[in-house]
Amino acid sequence: MAVDLTQISQVSTEPGELPATMAAWVIREDRLGEPSDAFQLEEIEVPEPGAFEVIVRVMAAGVNFNNVWAALGTPVSVFGYGDHPQYGHHIGGSDASGIVWKVGEGVTRWKPGDEVVVHCNQASYEDPEVHGLDPMAAPSQKIWGYETTWGSFAQFTKVQAQQLLPKPAALAWEEAASYGLTYFTAYRMLMDRAKIQAGDRVLIWGAAGGLGVFATQLVKAAGGESVGVVSSDEKGELVMKLGAKGYINRAEFDGMMRKGGETPAEEKERFAVTRAFAKRVKEILGESPDIVFEHVGKATFPTSVFTVKPFGKVVICGATSGYNLDFDVRYLWMRQKEILGSHFANAWECTLANKLIDDGLIRPVLWRTMGFDQVAEAHQLMHENKHAGKISVLVGATEEGQGRTGEGPGAIHAEVGA
């Protein structure tokens, strides 16, 4: 059945009651490939909430690279795990803002009509790690809208009640949908894993990218100082606006990037550039960094380990240039440095981070807002690296700027990139 896109912003029921069907952008296993082909509009039955679950009417959704992977079926197809075998389809989207529409049994904190932001960590309430260690350690831990279906590229989405956060009043729907996955990841990395303290100095790779724009603001909010590595002087100006003490255009030090398989002569040359880079970082910060904020991996990790001060910390959440790391470990053990892994955030960390947004201390950085009819196009842009920052998609909202109920600075609108 064809989906009437002119009716996407309209819902036939009042909060508390669900319609029978909804429009959704669906990926199926038999059409994995280019996002422009894999994502297709379908009319899908609206799921009912189970115990401790909530159905949210999606007003806006955020676009992340994880659902480019879901469309391509690489590096691993989503269809072999999570709840995909049960439902047979994938609705992506790991960021959302919206309105609570129906609550399941046992939900007491939220009610129909509440305006919310959704964080993307799910775990089983039966796992003991959830109740004493950390939900991120639970064997059932999954990223909603990627490792599970019922994501945000639909009129309604199904989430666990613990995923809900109050929507910041000063943000429009599209702004509130733009920050969760990257911001909450950066928050855990710095606040809980690296345990940043006032006065700490931080080196941030990709400081104008999706993670870096939040890391830069968080360092400033924590009373630290940062230097950001960026790909252009224009992006350097953005990170200065966000609170960095200085920036380095990585083009000046391209020779420090580790490609793998360097000959001894090539490695000696690379290391000389690394030393020059570390010297520049120290000149800007006054001392070598206490913390290095890593997510690039193979190309930068040897430089990160070398540059961080003795007893300093390298905290890493990803490896966009490759995950097989090759570095001189002598600079790790002899100078007693630490490497810390980090992955997304738990509900408490998300709550604390979201409060900083609500208080206006941290601001989302949004590049473009697109219509619901452009979900496949948005992911194709991302796949082809033709985007220039965070993309939000209007779903229930009919235009940008809707949903603000309070005063505040709102999002920064800018082109961003590592």
Image (spheres, rainbow, N blue to C red):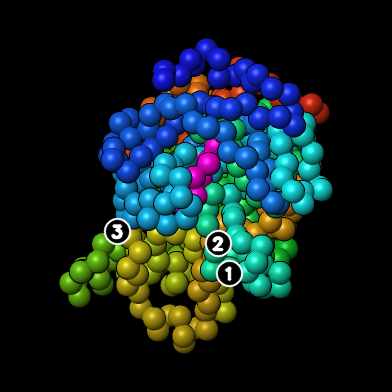
User: Amino acid type of disc 1?
Assistant: Ala
Q: Position of residue 282 (x, y in %)?
A: 53, 64
**In the rendered structure, which segment of residues is drawn in magenta?**
145-152
Per the image, label 3 sits on a secondary structure element best described as helix
Per the image, label 1 sits on a secondary structure element best described as helix
The residue carrying mark 1 is 137
Q: Nearer the viewer, mark 1 or mark 3?
A: 1
Q: Quadrant of residue 158?
A: top right
Crowdedness of circle 1 by 10 Å Cα count: few (<14), some, many (20+)?
some
Q: Position of residue 99 (x, y in %)?
A: 70, 32
Q: Is residue 258 visible?
A: yes
Q: Is residue 368 visible?
A: no
**Which residue does the image show at 55% across and 27% down from the upper left?**
21
Q: Is residue 186 left or right of residue 107?
A: left
Q: CA distance from mark 1 to mark 3?
A: 38 Å
Asked whether the beta carbons under mark 1 and mark 2 sit within 8 Å of each other, the answer is: yes
Q: Is residue 214 above or below residue 91?
A: below
Q: CA distance from mark 2 to mark 3?
A: 39 Å
Mark earlier in primary sequence (2, 3): 2
Mark earlier in primary sequence (1, 3): 1
Judging depth in this view, the residue of 391 and 232 nearest the camera is 391
Q: CA distance from mark 1 to mark 2?
A: 7 Å
**Which residue does the image show at 41% across and 44% down from the upper left?**
88
User: Amino acid type of disc 3?
Assistant: Gly
Say which mark, if any, is on residue 20: none
- Main SS category, magenta section: loop
The residue carrying mark 2 is 141
Q: Is residue 305 above or below residue 250?
A: below
The residue carrying mark 3 is 255
